[in-house]
Image (cartoon, rainbow, N blue to C red):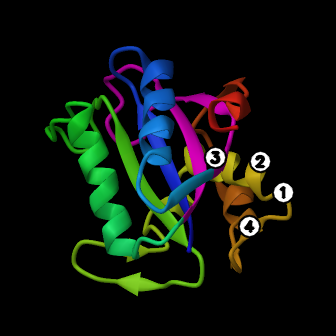
Amino acid sequence: MRYIISIGTNMGERESNIRGALEALSLLPKTQVLRASSLYETEPVGYANQQDFYNALAELESAFTPNEMLGACLGIEAGFGRVRGIKNGPRILDLDVILAQGVSLDEENLILPHPRYTERRFILEPLLELFPQGSAYGVEFLPYIERLTGQDIRKIKDLKETVL
């Protein structure tokens, strides 16, 4: 199954955290990182009194179920030392399952597609980079980008060498 995973960080060595998360994802059993978006710097959403984030998306191929993928992402976050405090607050690493090919879920711990991805430029812009036609796995997302205002985003660098 293919997945789109969002990777974000605004604490510590932000670029190193993103690269480390991509490496950790690539080490998951029966999982391959197919490609990553560029690295973006974005302003915080929700809780503004914090450092800007570095964000990227990764497309994976995995034998994991969506709940197993969520568990793996939570484990990687914990391995980086993530502590959950202020909602939308600073974090060393944030991994979210955004899309799973052919899957729609609404469970207590996992909703797919991710319930707020259409409100987040830091997800939609890298998603458009990976899927320039404006849809991924049959999910149209281009109209949501056109409706968003604010949420400054700036491309920092290409991450292709990280996953190839």
The amino acid on which the numbered mark 3 sits, given as a three-letter code, is Thr
Q: Which mark is residue 143?
A: 4
- For the C terminus, the image quarter is top right
The amino acid on which the numbered mark 4 sits, given as a three-letter code, is Pro
Q: Nearer the viewer, mark 4 or mark 2?
A: 2
Q: Describe the element under mark 3 as helix, strand or loop.
A: loop
Q: Nearer the viewer, mark 4 or mark 3?
A: 4
Residue 69 colored magenta?
no
Which residue is disc 1 drawn over? 132
Q: Nearer the viewer, mark 1 or mark 4?
A: 1
Magenta residues (range): 34-61
Closer-to-camera residue (143/59): 59
Mark pair 1, 4: CA separation = 13 Å
Q: Residue at x 68, y 53 (%)?
A: 127
Closer-to-camera residue (2/123): 2
Q: Residue at x 84, y 57 (%)?
A: 132
Which residue is disc 2 drawn over? 129
Q: Are marks 2 and 1 in contact (CB under 8 Å)?
A: yes
The amino acid on which the numbered mark 2 sits, given as a three-letter code, is Glu
Most extreme residue toward the front, as rendered? 29
The amino acid on which the numbered mark 1 sits, given as a three-letter code, is Pro
